[in-house]
Image (cartoon, rainbow, N blue to C red):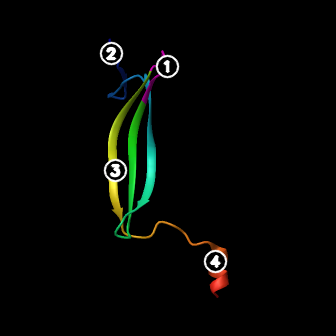
């Protein structure tokens, strides 16, 4: 059964689910050629508001070559160099 409410000529469905976007398995790896790659997974979590049933669906799995060094230098090391 689908309930739809009408407000000023717009159809508004009732809210029965809560959605979240989550990131898991994030990691940065140094490769043999000296560069870095970044990896992660993006998930959608849907929670039914009436019975609290939770569903998770994998949306995307990312693998990318980074175009910069991802680590910030330690300030103490930088001060010693000066």
Residue annotated with mark 2 = 2
Q: CA distance from mark 2 to mark 1?
A: 19 Å
Q: Position of residue 20 (x, y in %)?
A: 45, 36
Local crowd size for mark 4, using a 10 Å CA cut-off: few (<14), some (14–19), many (≥20) = few
Q: Nearer the viewer, residue 15 or 79?
A: 79
Local crowd size for mark 1, using a 10 Å CA cut-off: few (<14), some (14–19), many (≥20) = few
Task: Name the outermost residue toward the front.
Answer: 32
Residue at point 39%, 43% (across, down): 42
Residue 77 circle label: 4
Between label 3 and label 1, give the one nearer the viewer: 3
Q: CA distance from mark 1 to mark 4?
A: 51 Å
- Please tell me in which quadrant of the rendered image residue 15 appears: top left
| Magenta range | 46-53
Please tell me whether residue 47 belongs to the stretch shown in magenta. Answer: yes
Element at label 3: strand
N-terminal-most mark, 4 or 2: 2
Residue annotated with mark 3 = 62
N-terminal-most mark, 3 or 2: 2
Above or below residue 1? Residue 19 is below
N-terminal-most mark, 1 or 4: 1
Residue 37 circle label: none
Q: CA distance from mark 3 to mark 1?
A: 29 Å
Q: Position of residue 47 (x, y in %)?
A: 45, 25
């Amino acid at each position: 059964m689908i309930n739809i409410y009408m407000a000023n000529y717009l159809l508004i469905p009732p809210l029965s689910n809560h959605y979240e976007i989550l990131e898991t398995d994030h990691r940065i790896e140094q490769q043999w050629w000296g560069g870095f790659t970044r990896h992660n997974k993006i998930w959608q979590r849907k929670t039914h508001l009436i019975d609290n049933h939770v569903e998770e669906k994998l949306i995307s799995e990312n693998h990318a070559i980074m175009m910069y060094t991802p680590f910030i230098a330690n300030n103490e090391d930088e001060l010693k160099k000066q």
